[in-house]
Amino acid sequence: MTRRQGLSASLKLSARLKLTVSYAGFLLVAGAVLLAVVWVFLLRYVPDSPQGLLGVSPNRYLLVRTFIPAAAQAMMFLLVFGLVGGWVLAGRMLAPLTRIADAARTVTNGSLSHRIRMEGPEDEFRELADVFDTMLERLESHVAEQQRFAANASHELRTPLAISQALLDVARDDPAQNGDELVERLHTVNARAIDLTEALLLLSRADRRTFTRESVDLSLAAEEAAETLLPLAEQRGISLVVTGGTTRAVGSAALVLRMVTNLVQNAVVHNLPTGGTVTVHTESQHDASVLRVENTGRPLPPELVPVLTEPFQRGTDRARTDEHAGVGLGLAIVHSIVRAHDGTLDLAPRPTGGLVVTIRLPGGHRAPAAGRAR
Ligand SMILES: Nc1ncnc2c1ncn2[C@@H]1O[C@H](COP(=O)(O)OP(=O)(O)OP(=O)(O)O)[C@@H](O)[C@H]1O
Ligand SMILES: [Mg+2]
């Protein structure tokens, strides 16, 4: 038995002992009160005559002699009954706690798939066990998500390194090869690895919420993103329009710009091969600042849409050229930026193809909160 197990066993024992002693104690007090009442009652009905030995009547003497031993026996019986009964009852009461403690111990040893699944009536113990199970479920899926993320990130980072390695191997085996072309290809592969690493860093930075908050105008961010991506849109024959007016949110200007840029880039890249449109709209609605990016494109399978925000999740879009083959982090970054700003992200496929992405951020009409975020 480890020290901790021993400790928990002794704690359990002391809780059981305490309950047992309390139970027996209550029983004894109740018994004593009952006997006292009987004693008083008997005294009233046994006449007290002054002729007795030492001033005590023979009747009363007889009463004392018969009642006291019987009362003592009854108290002894109550004590034994209280201790045994209390021990058994306390054991039954504490049994669910033992199961919960066992489950916690299993989890501490690394098995997150364990569940208590307590059956029986809906009492406080059952509630505690259910809460524990729900917590384990969340924890398990969170850990699985993190593991998936790490595996995917490593895989994606390995790809450009493996390509560089292959290019270098070929160059070494064939010294006559054109060096300029090799350098150019290595440069492209390296740039892609840097982009990926930066995206991963950005994702973790947004998730940590460590950025200074200021008042940000979404319409300005939309204009800036559109300006940056206009050459790409023109190159693909896509019309890009920004509508709506000033609407303020509280947050990081750099992260908000990155969020809008990712959305507009997606809207351009995952659009129709020719003649597509992209509309970026900003407006204030009640207390929220709304940004909507809508684009034409191929119809998206509805079951795919909710998972697009997961890291490394790419659609079935095969029309992309290599130059814009993404890693699937764009929407994951948008999602974590939205979360860090306490906003909501909504993806809806358009019936005729393409996507409408709506972001709502808490309005920044009030004075921006000073200092750092949570
Ligand atoms: N506006 C859009 N219209 C249609 N499909 C979209 C749109 N935005 C995203 N998608 C789909 O969602 C997938 C995930 O998007 P996400 O931005 O996360 O990754 P990506 O664009 O493939 O790569 P990158 O990491 O370079 O952004 C895309 O591969 C695409 O299939
Ligand atoms: Mg993208």
Image (cartoon, helix red, strand yellow):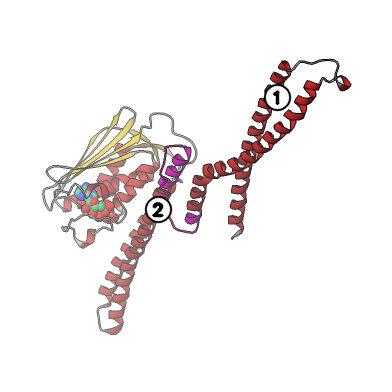
Name the residue rendered at 34%, 28% in the picture. Answer: 287
- Determine if the magenta segment contains residue 179: no
Name the residue rendered at 36%, 54% in the picture. Answer: 145
Mark identifier at residue 140? 2
Which residue is disc 1 drawn over? 36
Judging depth in this view, the residue of 234 and 41 nearest the camera is 41
SS category of the residue bearing label 2: helix
Start-end of magenta stretch: 105-134
Q: Is the CB–ligand 1 distance for label 1 below 8 Å?
A: no
Q: Residue 195 appears at what percent x and percent y? A: 33, 59
Is residue 229 in view?
Answer: no
Where is 127 relative to 63, above or below? below
Instruction: State how far apart marks 1 and 2 are (Cα).
Output: 61 Å
Query: In the rendered structure, which disc, 1 or 2, sits on the residue that comes first in sequence?
Result: 1
Left or right of residue 280, residue 70 in this image? right
Local packing at callout 2 (Cα closer than 10 Å; few below 14, some 14-19, many 20+) is some
Where is 86 relative to 148, above or below? above
